[in-house]
Image (spheres, rainbow, N blue to C red):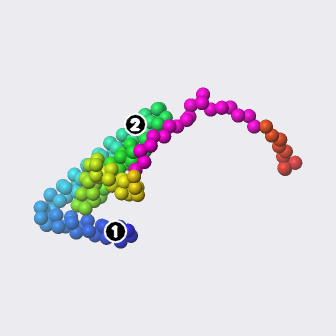
Amino acid sequence: MRWFFLLLPWFELFTLISLGAEIGALATLAYVFLTFVLGVTIIRAQGMEILTRMRAAQNDQVVVGQMLADEVSVGFAGLLLLIPGLFTDALGVLVLFGPLRRRLQRLFAGGEQSRHTFQANTNPQNHRAETLDGEFRRLDD
């Protein structure tokens, strides 16, 4: 995995140089700028969407794992689009598609994705008041 992260920038640089040779330098710069803007837009939109859904889930006291995984995955796709290069852009576009995103989530999760809904019990009426009896003495006296 270390080699992947060491060689990725060089591979991305090679693909951008090859793209520049095919379509021209200005068109390549425009492509890099547009994918950067698209990535920033996706990250900003997903950040606000995550906050909105988490607030709604907090009000309903329900957290859904699959919903959060989808939101984070789309944010990751935006991050991949921020990185200049054709390989990371292709991965980012693949992650944007729902069915492929869910397959990638299952692949990286190492099996079947959990689809459980967890109910938080933070209602004060549901908690019992417990009184603890005991004795104490100060040790510094």
Q: Which residue lies most toward the front here?
A: 112
Q: Earlier in the sequence, mark 2 or mark 1?
A: 1
The x, y position of residue 101, in whole percent, is 31, 51
The x, y position of residue 120, in whole percent, is 52, 37
Residue at horizontal 30%, vertical 67%?
9
Residue 106: numbered disc: none
The residue where tag 1 is placed is: 4
Label 1: element kind: helix
Is residue 119 left or right of 52 when viewed as pictured?
A: right
Above or below, comparing residue 31 to residue 68 in the picture: below
Q: In this rendered view, identify the residue nearer to me: 96 or 18.
A: 96
Residue 80 image-quadrant placement: bottom left
Residue at horizontal 46%, vertical 32%?
60
Residue neighbourhood size for the residue with mark 2, other residues' Cα within 10 Å, grouped as few (<14), some (14–19), many (≥20): few
**In whole angstroms, how far apart are the C-alphas of marks 2 and 1?**
35 Å
- Residue type, label 2: Thr
Label 2: element kind: helix
Residue at horizontal 47%, vertical 37%?
62
The x, y position of residue 2, in whole percent, is 38, 70
What residue range appears in magenta?
Answer: 113-132
The x, y position of residue 140, in whole percent, is 84, 50
Task: Quadrant for the N terminus, please.
Answer: bottom left
Residue 52: numbered disc: 2
Is residue 42 left or right of 109 when viewed as pictured?
A: left
